[in-house]
Amino acid sequence: MQKAAIIVLGLGMAVAAAEAIIVWQVPLDPRRLAAFLTAFALLLAVFVGFSHVPLVKWLRQMAVQSTALAAGMPFLLLVPYVIYSLGTGVFNVLALGKLAIYLAVPTWLLLPDRLRRAERVGWRDFAAMLALAVPMSAEWLAGIWTWPEDLYFFRPIFAVCVGAYAFLVVRNLDGVGYRLSFRKGDLIDGAANFAGFALIGIPLGLALGFLHFRPHGVPLWSLGFQLFAIYLTIAVPEEFLFRGILQNFLVRSLHGNRRSLYGLVIASLIFGAAHLHHAPVPNWRYAILAALAGMFYGNAFRNRQRLSAAALTHALVDTVWHFWF
């Protein structure tokens, strides 16, 4: 808990520093900016906090004690939106309702299983995964964080917080590997699986007509920032769902010596199918490459049992695609 308190304090200090720097350089309303930064810091604190095992265990103990407490605790995640929306003047009852429903559905679906450890996947688990994924994919949560414009990055961070509470706390799912920091092995495995995908995926993508080589020079700082942004808002959320939850659950539920491989393959195929909705629909080229990429993301996760390794491979793939194809 001490580490979690230090994280919150550090984010608070970062918010104050960020506001001072931004107000000095850009003529923004300090009150609105303070509300925006405070809300983002709170949400980011929860996002990081769920990677802290003692905090998850403490929340788990509270959830086991009371059904009402387990069902009600996630609604604290509405506090950042209330601060943000009231402070920036964009409060909307419909937006608040959407967030509340998004919080409630996956959490309440898993409540009947909260008193036992997750050993095999069940229909409620699949339903909760869909409840997390479909609103994001369909952009039902767009138009909520709208100052100074519609901000995408709040959505995936919020989604991970909801999913982490539902599956780590309520469902008591082990082996998710929700870690954001890197160990040496994560870096090695992440880079190796990226190289493996590049050797197969780039020629295949060019042959399918999905990729077109269009390199454009960018400053190193821009490349680094894009890599970090993709890691935080795309790679971690998607790897959390497809590897940490889905692949993890499949491996637990299958039988035989090759269940780890079969779980990886099935999760990768589902990951590929999840990209069919991109234009032109059905985008089978995208689905094929995404399924192939999922094999390497899943392999990084299988080797390290940490999302940071899989998310690094994912972020490297998306960054190279963004800047060179």
Image (tube, grey):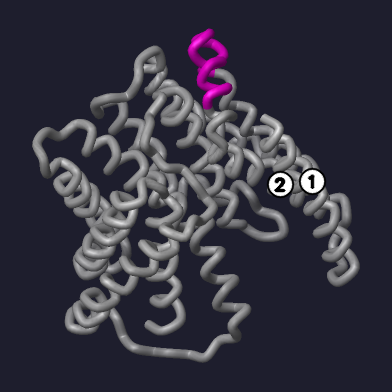
Measured as percent of width and height from the top left, residue 23 is found at 88, 64
Q: Is residue 208 visible?
A: yes
- Give the amino acid type for the residue marked by disc 1 in the picture: Gly
Residue 12 marker: 1
Q: What type of secondary structure mainly makes up the magenta span?
A: helix
Quarter where residue 247 is shown: top left
Query: In the picture, residue 93 is in which quadrant?
Result: top right
Q: Is residue 60 magenta?
A: yes
Is 24 left, or right, of 137 in this rendering?
right
**Measured from the top left, where is residue 135 in percent x and y?**
42, 43
Q: Are marks 2 and 1 in contact (CB under 8 Å)?
A: yes
Q: Disc 2 marks which residue?
A: 41
**Residue at position x 40%, y 17% in the image:** 114
Taking the image as drawn, is residue 210 in sight?
no
Name the residue: 38% across, 69% down: 191
Q: Earlier in the sequence, mark 2 or mark 1?
A: 1
Circle 2: residue type? Ala
Asked whether 217 falls inside the magenta stretch, the response is no
Task: Estimate the spatial distance between the alpha carbons at disc 2 and disc 1, rounded to whole Å.
Answer: 7 Å
Q: Position of residue 325 (x, y in %)?
A: 37, 82
Image check: 39 left or right of 264? right
